[in-house]
Structure formats: structure tokens, C-alpha cells
Image (cartoon, coloured by chain):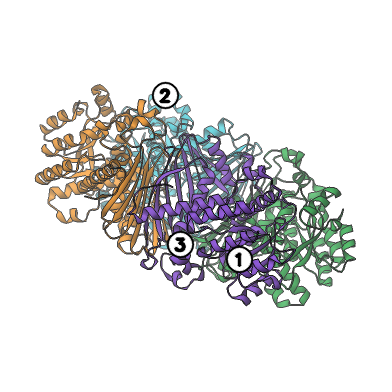
Chain colours: A orange, B purple, C green, D cyan
Amino acid sequence: MLIGEKKIERPLRWAMIGGGRTSNVGYKHRLGALRDNTAYELVAAAFDIDEARGREFAENLGVDGSRSYPDYRTLIQEEAKREDGVEVVSIATPNSTHFEITKAALNAGLHVICEKPLFFEVSEGEEIQKLADEKGLIVGVTYGFSGHPLLLQMRQMVQNGDLGDIRMVELQYTHGFNATDAGDKFAEGQKWRVDPKIAGKSFVLGDLSTHTFFMSELICPDLKIEKLLCDRQSFIESRKPLEDNAYVLMHYTNGAVGRLWTSSVNAGCMNGHRIRIIGSKASIEWRDNQPNELTYEVQGEPIQTMIRAMDYLYPECNEYERLGALHAEGLPESWANIYLKFAIAIDAKRRGDQETLDHLVYPSLEYGIEGIRWITNCVKSADAGSTWVAYK
Amino acid sequence: MLIGEKKIERPLRWAMIGGGRTSNVGYKHRLGALRDNTAYELVAAAFDIDEARGREFAENLGVDGSRSYPDYRTLIQEEAKREDGVEVVSIATPNSTHFEITKAALNAGLHVICEKPLFFEVSEGEEIQKLADEKGLIVGVTYGFSGHPLLLQMRQMVQNGDLGDIRMVELQYTHGFNATDAGDKFAEGQKWRVDPKIAGKSFVLGDLSTHTFFMSELICPDLKIEKLLCDRQSFIESRKPLEDNAYVLMHYTNGAVGRLWTSSVNAGCMNGHRIRIIGSKASIEWRDNQPNELTYEVQGEPIQTMIRAMDYLYPECNEYERLGALHAEGLPESWANIYLKFAIAIDAKRRGDQETLDHLVYPSLEYGIEGIRWITNCVKSADAGSTWVAYK
Amino acid sequence: MLIGEKKIERPLRWAMIGGGRTSNVGYKHRLGALRDNTAYELVAAAFDIDEARGREFAENLGVDGSRSYPDYRTLIQEEAKREDGVEVVSIATPNSTHFEITKAALNAGLHVICEKPLFFEVSEGEEIQKLADEKGLIVGVTYGFSGHPLLLQMRQMVQNGDLGDIRMVELQYTHGFNATDAGDKFAEGQKWRVDPKIAGKSFVLGDLSTHTFFMSELICPDLKIEKLLCDRQSFIESRKPLEDNAYVLMHYTNGAVGRLWTSSVNAGCMNGHRIRIIGSKASIEWRDNQPNELTYEVQGEPIQTMIRAMDYLYPECNEYERLGALHAEGLPESWANIYLKFAIAIDAKRRGDQETLDHLVYPSLEYGIEGIRWITNCVKSADAGSTWVAYK
Amino acid sequence: MLIGEKKIERPLRWAMIGGGRTSNVGYKHRLGALRDNTAYELVAAAFDIDEARGREFAENLGVDGSRSYPDYRTLIQEEAKREDGVEVVSIATPNSTHFEITKAALNAGLHVICEKPLFFEVSEGEEIQKLADEKGLIVGVTYGFSGHPLLLQMRQMVQNGDLGDIRMVELQYTHGFNATDAGDKFAEGQKWRVDPKIAGKSFVLGDLSTHTFFMSELICPDLKIEKLLCDRQSFIESRKPLEDNAYVLMHYTNGAVGRLWTSSVNAGCMNGHRIRIIGSKASIEWRDNQPNELTYEVQGEPIQTMIRAMDYLYPECNEYERLGALHAEGLPESWANIYLKFAIAIDAKRRGDQETLDHLVYPSLEYGIEGIRWITNCVKSADAGSTWVAYK
């Protein structure tokens, strides 16, 4: 059970790049990193392209105004001059900038925590991987839903054979907030998401379903995709070639099959993020709008609803428990859990503690690269007329 | 509101072929037909290949033992000799026999109500269509879920533009009762379903999802499939080439897309029959395990749950209401509604009342043929390596 | 599993008194009695105070017009003259007439099935009990929800100690359809319910919650009330002294306690009929708007949802199963089950088969009397300033 | 929308008394206070009666070990000597100590945030009120669920007449974790709760339902109790005279009625905290295990489910929004909201900003006193044989 006590010797000196006042996601990073003040300390920031607004915001969060910088380059350069300079930066900027910022940060010896989708190309991911390895640095990816404790229960159940052989994976991350193009025109956080130059080659595949795809990898680490087929649509014409709706079919090497639906035009849908894993004996299903419950359906037995924090869960699940079973956790706890793991990974890396790194289950760089690979294959299939493509 | 009063001059003299004591579905036919004793009267039967068991069963249901026949041929032949002979027969036998029995019954001047999937080939359907037209007879298909009143509400909402333009159709009919092969070996009602000679070219596509496909046609009459892709699996090897799991992707001529999942190996799933229609403004969703509720989600508004029988529903929906809003209807009411409509159709046909026939929304022969066409296209796609096939 | 086969030698000749075209509840009686045509045959009726309307209605249901009578007296008198006269009558008239009609029917040698609340006074119930015993006749009470199969599962679970010692009983039957007085003025079926001369000394206590109270007796046959307290309100002034909302607290002789809420002014409530039984180890909960599910909560274990018809249920529950687990049953199946049991009781009574009568669990006369006793105690408490009254 | 920016000039210097490593609730205080590091800074603590454990814990949370004190007296005394001494203390100790610690803190000029139930006697509350007024200090009460944003939506809906006249209040806070006495014997956090010397005159009434009672006051500020009746039980004998189950009936001065159930022996119940407010036109219902949804049921209209953060909610509700509608908030956000309000109140008090204080809706001292008054009346009624007592 987590209760806020330190897991690493002292909090890491942390800076944010992007994620300022007008960013919804920026607050999620801070909610995650600063949960207990024992893993990170926010000491610097390049929050905003509007320098004055960024500084005011930083100061309002308690950051020394002199360490609010106009851009990431200045931040990296100036912090490098300080003895107490930042050790790790979080990147919460539009997609097209992730690669260059990550590279610059690593080159400056900083650990990196970066938004998804990580980069545009797998090759970029591999270049970063090589650089991070050389520098001995961690790159974490903020698959922010993936810290919900019950996902670890699902992982253990799959691993322990509670479901039998895995046959099907059913993934969905949909909502309806882009059913019209209103936001495309006016909302700062939406405009760039439908601009291929900034967002990359996908909209909802990258923005929404890479989360869910990672969660399926977390739960079913042994499943490897053999081939997939993606059918994508742009119901709002102006979004072309970027999709606002996509279906993916997947065949795994072990004979299992999978299906994914992602959409931001699923009008009215408020509970459209869910994962179902189906085995030869039983299924499990989880939805992120009620993250405290897990459905466990054994064929021929009463349906079971498992509740977060209860003693009947696997210890691996309850290790990340914070509140007790009667109390609802929400998304901030999930972010806090992955940020805590990033800190543990960084600390272990610094200490050369490979055993800790080998056992820590978290959204590491390799999963970020897998996310790029998956999007790349999806787009390739869709652009080839929604045909099957061998996964590579 | 229905209250049991006659809708046709007198009850039709009705016989069942198949659906005897060991048949689950046979009782559903009787629950549907005999709901109010004002539409049908069960006067004869060829319930069972075990003649004595069939006769005892018929007598236990109140049928005169002398009108319990050993097979459908005898039934048709002997009843034809009576002045008060049967007027309509229901066919609840395995799939492979539907065509010949339907043909024989029509040739004997009898109306027919037949289980789905109707026949094996579209051409058979067309032959029957021709014959029925010549004879002036009705052939109805027991898409037994399709009589739930809220489906008519959905149809009206789509028709009246409450959802905006239809963009997506999301269909699912899955359960887990065949997660193992136990039933394939021992259960009388399951064995033939996985035998291609008796079941035809599909298992779950025909057994389960033709229901759901028809319901989508009922709700969205204007959607026409342009092309589809089907990916099917036989998780239990011995079922090959018949599938126990299948995914279908559909493109409609108006630019809408659709998805269907059918499975009898969705382990533990007890609520896996659902329909979601997504428009540019709103979505509606219905599940058959709680048929008294309809979710209506308008983007940007509170989620609405509509309850069967309430005054705010369209009159077309409440016309088939029986109990009042506080009281749960179940599957038998759905069967009763479609059987009532078959009776109204037969009666109208006899009276030459084309107007009634033109306005009656029910699972008629043409929808049975559409079901065959859909299965045929699905199997063709699956067998061609799960590639897109132009729908025809 | 029920499949429509006869349980008694031949269908009983049955008549309805009340429950004509304008009656919602009348149809429920017919849905119950005529489910399989093997337990009852509707041969006569006194449906309506409007004789012509009643006759037309009877004929529309298939009853010989000559056996549609203007009132119950004529029905009893005329049918007595026939060799094939009625054997059992159902009384679906306003409360104030139940006693005299029941008495007349019994005196004419007819079995009786009567709406709840049965009569106004316990003494009337005792008089009828004596008369029925003398005549060797059955009086059944249409607690129409009590035939849902899962209630028998609950009874078995309590009996077998699955819950441990019973500590609390939580009962609710509420809706909001009388939140305003609109119906009181105009709706034929509502007007008399708020007139003490016709309805008796209670409105919702008798109209709604006697159902739920009986179901609690069915599930927990060993619980006996020691004392109770009732607090009732008339939120619509014109209903005084009859209540449209009431709370009841109960102490049972074994130390258990209970609570009941009944209301027809629970604005907007569409799922307000539920029963929760709490033991020292576990609880069970059932709602009538989803009668196919039962929640079973063992302290410290995952929540279980049991589904109707599954093999893991007690045999006593599945004996009344009709459709199979994937298919929703509704209220008509519940009515069919209790009507079937009335027929079995009547048949056993005629045959002098006391063993069958001793083992048959159904809403018999004694439970009807218990319902009157419970209302009487509630009203007594409420009228004494909502104080505790010793139950007797 | 909240995003972490400061609401007061600088964070308050804050200390905790109690709530150390073995305390579940202590972490909730820290989750609440330290959410954004802009309202509080944890600078000192008397966490534990085990001094060494307390110090280690404090240091692990980042508190300077020299400011970890063995008891509250030392804390108050030593911190008073510092220029940068604490300004506000949170009291998370067993009930019996609240009064003396609060008094000591106020006398030392410190603001106080105290666990519920506040004190044992209303007179103690009044003494503290007088002292706090004299000193110009704030006393807040951690009704920790009351910060959920949708409760403010409920308050606005009631205030704006969306429900019509309020007729009924239905309150429940139950769980089953004390169905046996195991925890009473061994669990540090449970033992004292059933010891009247430490817990006071009630167990679950004070421990659980004072939360819910306060939330009803928050939502319906105009309802005043006229009289109440409480029926309480100790299903585990050793808990006597303290109750583990209680029912309360309430009459309000405006003619509305209410009902409350609190229990820690509701075996297996995991979702037993809920509030329903019923008006003449509509009802609203909220459950704390899914705090992101609010059911709004208008009689005669579809049931509405409102989702946290959506634009259709009242501005007063969305002012405390942190994540956006697609993302689940949990209990920590509720705690963060009330702790933020305590800080705003303290800041306003210091600045003499009475207007802010007049408009701030939060669990202030007066509501803590109301909680004591309510428990006192409940216990008085229960001990008088569960009779009605005039509320005072």
C-alpha cells in the first residue's frame, strides 16, 4: 500500500516543457509527479510559447520565476549551468516536437518523460533508444491510464492462467467530442491534433488508442501481432487524411485475434474506453470510467465484480493501492503511479540497479516505440485500402 | 397498447414442424404464437422424429393425438384432407431441412413461418419468393428478438433524424456457452449446429448474428452494404470450417461504416447482444438482456435512458406495448409481437389488403433472403483470406 | 424446466371478474393463466360494468358471448347451471368488492384467485379461511411479482445458510407516477385507489408494498415480526387519510430488523422495487426491473451476479425456468408461474393430495391474510403518531 | 476549472497531529492538503505515539526531523517559538482527543482542521465556536466526501427549483467490513471506534453517517429537522452500547421527510454510500463509488445521467473541476477541494475578507457542531426506545 513515503532517496529535480495554463494534460503531469512530494520537485519550466504567461503560471505554481524559460532550448542550456539544475524533464508539447526535444534533453544528460504518441517514425525511436542507452538515461512515456492498479490484476490473471489460453482481445477507446468540427477550428488543444504536420500521420489512432494498445501489451505481454488490418474514416472531411474513426483487426502469432475501435465521433459516448481479454475459460473486462471495478466472467459461474484494494486481489495489484476499497480512485492516481515508477526507474538507472529495472512494469521507451510501430502499421494498412499487412 | 384482443377475424389453424420436447426454441414459438389465443390455435404438429414422444408431447400441449404426425410430409398430406386443416406451419427444424419443408408447405397452400437462417443459398430464397408470390402466401422468418418494442423506437428516431446522419453501426451477438466443445458432442441442439451438412456454411454468423443483422436493417432501412470483410475463427478445431467467432467490417453506400462481432466462445459473457447506432448528433444503444431500456446519447447533453412504454416514445413503439412502463417485458413478448405480425400479414394477404402489407414492419421473406445474402458474403470474404468483397 | 406441458390432467374452466378492456392488470391475469393453455381455459367473464363493452371484449378474446355476464352474481348463478360451468374465478375488481365476491364464489363451490390487498380486515380473511376449508377450495392471491424464479433461489440460499444468520431485511417498492394528482382525477384505474371507501385504509402500503412484504415472507419464511413502526405521508393533500408515501421499521422475533419504503411519489423513479436480505456472512439483492439477475455479495469476496437459469442455481429455482439463461424473462413469466401453482394447488385439493399442497410454495390465502394483518398494523402505528405497535 | 494555480498568496505552514504510518485517513489528509503545493506546505507533525516511528515517517515524507514531535502539546509549544512556525494544524486522532487538541491549538493562535465527528457534546462545539470567534481563527471539519463537484450541482438544482418542492431525503452510508468482530480485536484503526470512551456515544452514526448528513445539509440548506427517530442495533454484542447498524427517520419543518441508514454490517456491500433527493417534479441521486455521475429523474421524462465537468452543469459545480469530463475523479479530488476551501477560508479570515467567508460553501465549524447535534439527537431517541424526539 502506498502512503506517500519516499521510494527514492530524495525527490528528483523536475521541469516541464509545455503543459502550461491552457493545457489540460499539463495538470495531469503535475498531478502525477507531485502527488506526494517524495518523487519529484518542480523546479523549472518552459510552460508556454507566451513567455510572460508562462512565467506567471510558473510562479503561481510555486516555481521560481527566474527558472521559467521561454523555450526548451533555453531551459536545457540554463539549467545545465546550475549545480541544482533539473535532472528530468517532462515533454507535454505537440507531437511534432517530441523527437527534437527528447534528443536535446538526452544529449544534455537529462532523463525524459514524454507524451504519446512518442515520435513519428520507428527509426526515430530507435535513434533515441541508442542515445538513451549510451547516456544511461531513462525515457518514459505517459500512457496515463496505465497506472490503474486493476490493470496489474489483469496482467497477473493472464499470466497465472486464470483465463485459460488467450483467444481474443477487445479494445476500445472512443468518445464523441469531435462529432462536429467546432473544436478543430477554435480549441487550441484540438487544432494541431488534426494537422498532419504537427500531429503526424494519425489523429485518433495516436491520440487515443495508443493508450489502449499499450494497456493490452501490459496485460498480455506474450501476445505479438502477426498481421493487422486497419479501416479508417474521416467523417469530418477537413480532417483528411487524418482519421476521426478507425477499426483495427489483429492476428497474433499464437492464434489469438484482436479488435480495436477508436473514435472521437462516437456521438454522446462517455464511457468508451474499455478492455476485454477473453480466454478459453474466462474473460476479464475493465472500463476507465469506473477504474475501481474489474469484471471477471468464468464460463458457467456467476459473474464476478472485483473491487480495487480488496484482499482477494493479487499482491502485485495491491502494491499500488492508496485509499482502501471503499474509496474511489480516479485518473490522478494512475498518473501518480506511472510517475512514481519513472522515478524508481531513474533512481535505479543512476544507481546501476539493473534488477529493479528488469522487474519494473511501466511504460518505458520500448513501449513508446511499439506504439509508433503499431500506428505505422495501421496507417500503412488503411492507406493500402484497408488490407492486411504483415506486422513489422 | 396490446391487451390480447383479436387483430384478425379468427385464430389461424397452426401446426409446428420440429420444436418438440427436447427443443428450447420450440417453446419460444409457442410462447409467441399462443400468447393471447386470438391469432393462432395449435391444431397439429410433427414435433419429433421419435413419433411416440412427439405424440405424447402434442397431447400434453392439448393437441389432438390424431393430429400429431411422424413427419412434415404426413402432416401436410393428412391435414390437406381436412376441412379444418392447418393454414400455417412453423418450421423449427435444423437448417438443412428448411428449404424442402417450406417448399412443400407452400405447394400445399400453407403459409410458412420459418427459423433462421432461412436456407443455404440466395437462389433458394428467390425460388421460394417466386413460389410464395404465385401462391399468394406469406413466409415469415423468426428473427425472434426483433419484436421488442424499443427497436421500433430506434427505427423512428433514425427515420426522424434524431441522430443526424448515420455514421456507424455497431453490432454484437456473442456468448460463451461453446467455449469448450462439450456441447458439440452431447447436446442434441448443438451437435448439428457445427455440422456443415446440416447447419450450412456458417455456425455463429447464421445462428446468432443474422438476428442482429436483421435488427440493424429494421432500425436503419436506408443503409445498404457496399462491401464487407469477414474474419472468422474456429477456436475449437473440430468445428472447422465452421466458425465459432467472427468479425465483420461493413461499408455502406452512404459512407457509413459498420462492425459486427459474433461469437459463442466469448467466455462468461451473459450480456453480449447489443446494437449501437451512431449519428452525427447522437447515438442510441440497446441490449437484449435489458430490453426495456434504450440509451440515447446526444453529444453534449446528459445521457438519456428511455424506458419501454413511456409516453415520450414514438407512437409506433408504444403500439406494441403490453404491460406498462413499470413492468419488465422479456423475450416472449418479442416473439408474441412478431407472431402477431405474421398473423396480420397472413390475414391481409388472404383479404388482398395490400395497404396493410405495405405498412407492416416485420421479418418477412425478403429479410430472410437478405440474411442468407449477408452470410454468403461473409463466408465468401472469410474464405478468400478475409478480404473485402463487393456486396451482392 | 417448464416447456408448456400439462401439469394437471386438463385445463381448469376459468372466468374473470373485472379486468376488462380498460384494466391494465386484467391482461396480466390472462397472460398468467393462459400461458400454455394447459392449466386454464377462459370460458366466461364478467369483465366490465359496461355490459356491452364487456361482451365485445370477451368475444374479442375468444369467449362465447353468451358467457359474458353483466356482473359477478349473474356469472356465478348462470355458470352454476351448466355442466361445463366455471371451476375457478379470478377477481380483478377494486378492493372493496373482494370480500363479497370471494365469499359468493366459495359458496358456489368455486376456487378463487383474488387481487391484493385481499380484504380490508383480518377477520374477513379468517372468515374466508374457514369457509374455504369447509368447502375444500383454494383461494390464491395474485402477488404477481412473486413468481420470478430467482426469488426461489433467494429462499433456498437463506434456508441453506448461505448468508449466515439473517440480520436485516431491506424492502422497497416505489415509483413516481402519482407525483401529481393528475391521475387521481382522470384515470379510471387510479381514482378508486385513493378513495378509502373502495381502496380501504391504505393506498401505497396495500397497492404496492404488500407485494414486497409477501416476497420477503417467501424468501425468509422463518422471520416473524415482533413489532413495527410506520410513518406515512400524503404529499398530495386530497389523498388524506390515504398515504402516497410510507416508511416502515420492523423488529423480528429473532433479533433481525427490517425496513420498508413504499411510495408513488418517488418522482422519476423507474427501478424502485427491490429486496435486499443481509446476513452475518453475505447479502443478496434483487430488483424487479431486471428480474433475471441476482446480486450475491459475500463479505470479503468479489461481488457475484447470478443469472437466471444457470446450472449453478439451486434446482428449486430452475424448476420454474422457461427460456434459458441467455434470454430475458419478464413479468408475464412470473404471473404464469403463480397461476400455474394455483392450478396445481386446485388440482391437488380436488384430488385430496395433501402432500403436494404441503410442499407447494405459492401465494396462498394465508399469505393474503398476512398481508391484511401487516397493513392493519402499519396503519395502526401510523395513526397512533408513528409509534411502535406490537405485531398481532 | 482548477489547474493547480495558487488561490492564496502563499502556501500555509501546516502540521498534522495523528494520521501517521498506520493510519489510512492520514494519507487522505495529505492527499487533500498537498494536492498542488499552492495551499499548504507540510512543515511539522506529531504523527505517532511511537516517537521514533513518527519521526522516520515524517522524514520519509520530507518533513525536517527536528519538527517531528512526540505529541501535540510539544508541537504547539515548540512551533510557537519559531518565526516560521505552523499556522494551521490538522487533527486526525481518535475522537476523544479532538476537543482538547482543538482548544489548545486555537489558544495557540492556530487554525484547525479536524476529523469528524468533531467532539462529543454540542456544548463543546459551542465553547470552541466562541474561542475561534474570539481568536479570529477557522475550524474546518473533514467531511471528506463533501468536496465532490457534483454535490454542488445538486445544491444548485435544489436551489433553482429543478426538483420542485423537496419532499423526501434518502440517505445511506453502509458497508460490511465489520460484519464480524475480527477487526474490533486486532485492527488499530477499528479497536477504538467501538470503545465509547474514545469513540463517544456512537459508532457508525458518527463514523459514517455524519458524512452523509452533512452532505444533505450542503445540498438542501433550507431543510431543518423538526423531529427524528433512531433505531439502532449492535449485531456484534461486544459493541454494545455502540451501534453497528442504525435507521433514522426525520421530519423536516417544511413537511418533507427523510430516512437514513448507516451500517458497517451490511455484509458484502461495496457501494453503500448514496444520496437521493426527491422533489415534487424530479429526483436526483448520487453514489460515492461513482462520484462522476449524477442521476436526474424528471417524472415522465427519460432518466438523465449527468457527467462531471460537462458544460450543461451549473457553473458553481464546474468551478471545482480538475480533469475534464472523460476522466474519472476519485476521493482525493474531493479532499483536495475541501482542503483548498479551508485554505481560502483561513486566508480570507486573516485578511478580514468577510465577503469571501460569507459565500464559501464548505464544512465549517458550524456544520461540525450540527453533526454533533444530530448524533446526540439520534442517540437520545435510540436510548429512549427508538421514539420520536423533538430536534434541538
Q: Amino acid at mark 3?
A: Gly
Say which residue label 1 marks: B17
In front of the other: C329 or C150? C329
User: Residue A275: x, y in percent?
Assistant: 37, 51
Q: Residue at x 18, y 55 (%)?
A: A358
* C297 on left or right of A280: right
Q: Secondary structure at mark 2?
A: loop
Marks 2 and 1, how far apart in space?
85 Å
In front of the other: C34 or A303? C34
For the N terminus of chain D, which image quadrant?
top left
Dot 3: within a 10 Å radius of its alpha carbon, few (fewer than 14), some, or many (20 or more) residues? many
Instruction: Answer whether residue A277 is visible to the viewer in this image.
Output: no
User: Residue B233: x, y in percent?
Assistant: 36, 59
Q: Which mark is residue D99?
A: none
* A130 on left or right of A268: left
Say which residue label 2 marks: D353
